[in-house]
Image (cartoon, grey):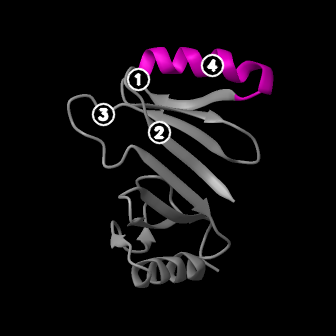
């Protein structure tokens, strides 16, 4: 399942207003964010659609997709399989406590340079 997708936008305030209005009939609502940096919209089933603007710094990638998996072992397995398939390392599997206490993820860059993540946000079992 897709946990979240993040896209770069040219004007964060215009895009925030646009998505707030466009998502209204779908019942999607603004969930959280940081003024001038990003906004996250709850699009149901625990999934988020995020918009970001990085100002004068170029974004890591223009598109980021995070896949929610069922275990830390799956995060590790995805990471190694992706590297073997030709991805570039963009963050080895591990805890990302800056996101949440139990957020365990890895990041790879696909053949086109997009940031692809596998993640789970549950305590280790």
Residue 113 is situated, as x and y percent measured from the top left of the image, at 35, 58
Disc 2: which residue? 7
Instruction: Reply above or below: 70 against 14.
Output: below
Disc 1: which residue? 35
CA gap, disc 2 and disc 1: 16 Å
| Magenta region, residue range | 12-28
Query: Pointer 4 and pointer 1: residues touching (CB < 8 Å)?
Result: no
Q: Earlier in the sequence, mark 4 or mark 3?
A: 4
CA gap, disc 4 and disc 3: 20 Å
| Residue shown at the point (38%, 59%) measured from the top left | 112
Residue 49 is situated, as x and y percent measured from the top left of the image, at 59, 39
What type of secondary structure mainly makes up the magenta span? helix
Q: Earlier in the sequence, mark 4 or mark 2?
A: 2
Res 102 quadrant in image: bottom right
Q: Secondary structure at mark 1?
A: loop
| Residue shown at the point (40%, 79%) measured from the top left | 83
Q: Earlier in the sequence, mark 2 or mark 3?
A: 2
The residue lying toward the viewer, choosing from 34 and 114, is 114
CA gap, disc 4 and disc 1: 15 Å
Residue 64 is situated, as x and y percent measured from the top left of the image, at 46, 50
The answer to whether residue 90 is left or right of residue 7 is left
Q: Earlier in the sequence, mark 2 or mark 1?
A: 2
Disc 4: which residue? 20
Disc 3: which residue? 54
CA gap, disc 2 and disc 3: 11 Å
Which of label 3 and label 1 is nearer to you? 3
């Amino acid at each position: 399942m897709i946990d979240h997708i993040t896209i770069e936008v040219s004007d964060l305030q215009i895009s925030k207003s646009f998505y707030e209005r466009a998502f209204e009939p779908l019942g999607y609502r603004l969930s959280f964010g940081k003024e001038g940096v990003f906004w996250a919209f709850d699009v149901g089933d625990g999934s988020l659609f995020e918009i970001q603007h990085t100002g004068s710094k170029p974004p890591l990638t223009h598109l980021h997709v995070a896949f929610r998996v069922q275990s830390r072992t799956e995060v590790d397995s995805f990471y190694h399989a992706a590297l073997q398939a030709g991805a570039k390392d963009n963050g080895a599997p591990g805890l990302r406590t800056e996101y949440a206490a139990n957020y365990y993820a890895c990041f790879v860059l696909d053949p086109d340079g997009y940031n692809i993540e596998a993640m789970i946000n549950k305590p280790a079992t």
